[in-house]
């Protein structure tokens, strides 16, 4: 991954910031654990992480719709790219609603606001980077959208072709 980051021009920029954020989160968990017992700390961070994953899932559902509607119009399916993500998003919103109403006991009542603050901080950082270094945003998009040369292509079709090729080679060696 580092070779790819160097190739895309990300070293020393976004990845360093991301690494710093991950390390700070790694120090934050034991720091909080000093004030509570480990099971409580695990529950707090597990619940907060689960809530974050639910929001990521919602963003992915919205992204699927927008991507296929805007860029892949010929492959757009109202059922696969609109109705199914909408139903999935509605189902995911049920536990999120439970964290907002009725208002839970502290510290659980703070989770939606902590997560909203974290997302807001991320959006501000993204906005600042996009204004100061738009080429970095494009490089990050390219890094995530295309398979790099140093990464194997593991699409389902390639795996099946490889399995067929291996099976054919075994048959030839047996005969």
Image (cartoon, rainbow, N blue to C red):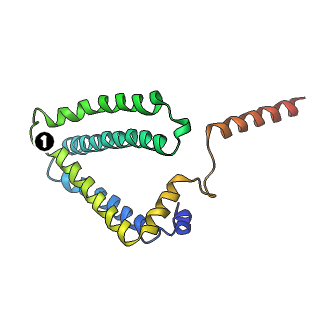
Q: Quadrant of the C terminus?
A: top right
Residue position for label 1: 109
**Looking at the picture, does residue 14 appear above or below residue 99?**
below
Which residue is pictured at 34% across the width and 39% down the height?
58
Residue closest to the eye, 5 or 71: 71
Which residue is pictured at 29% across the width and 40% down the height?
50
Which residue is pictured at 40% across the width and 28% down the height?
83
**Looking at the picture, does residue 139 appear above or below residue 85?**
below
Q: Position of residue 127 (x, y in %)?
A: 32, 63
Q: Is residue 148 shown left or right of residue 91?
A: right
Residue closest to the eye, 100 or 38: 100
In the rendered image, which quarter is residue 167 located in? Answer: top right
Residue 27 in view: no
Label 1 Cα crowd, 10 Å radius (few <14 / some 14-19 / many 20+): some
Q: Element at badge 1?
A: helix
Residue closest to the eye, 86 or 102: 86
Residue closest to the eye, 61 or 103: 61
In the rendered image, which quarter is residue 100 located in? Answer: top left
Q: Is residue 133 shown left or right of residue 142?
A: left
**Looking at the picture, does residue 42 appear above or below residue 151?**
above
Image mark count: 1
Q: Is residue 161 shown left or right of residue 60?
A: right
Q: Position of residue 113 (x, y in %)?
A: 17, 48
Which residue is pictured at 19% across the width and 53% down the height?
32
Q: Position of residue 28 (x, y in %)?
A: 24, 57
Outermost residue on the right side: it is: 175
Q: Is residue 105 shown left or right of residue 148?
A: left
Q: Position of residue 55 (x, y in %)?
A: 30, 42
Residue 89 in view: yes
């Amino acid at each position: 991954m580092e070779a790819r980051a160097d190739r895309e021009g990300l070293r020393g920029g976004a990845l360093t910031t991301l690494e710093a954020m991950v390390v700070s989160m790694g120090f934050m968990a034991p720091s909080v654990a000093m004030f509570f017992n480990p099971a409580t700390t695990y529950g707090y961070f597990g619940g907060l992480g689960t809530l974050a994953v639910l929001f990521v899932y919602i963003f992915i559902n919205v992204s699927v719709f927008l991507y296929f509607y805007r860029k892949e119009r010929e492959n757009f399916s109202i059922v696969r790219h609109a109705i199914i993500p909408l139903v999935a998003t509605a189902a995911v919103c049920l536990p999120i609603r439970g964290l907002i109403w009725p208002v839970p006991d502290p510290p659980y009542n703070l989770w939606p606001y902590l997560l909203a603050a974290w997302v807001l901080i991320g959006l501000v950082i993204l906005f600042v980077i996009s204004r100061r270094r738009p080429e970095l945003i494009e490089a990050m998009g390219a890094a995530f959208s295309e398979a790099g040369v140093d990464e194997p292509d593991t699409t389902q079709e390639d795996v099946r072709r490889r399995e067929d090729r291996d099976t054919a080679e075994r048959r030839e060696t047996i005969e």
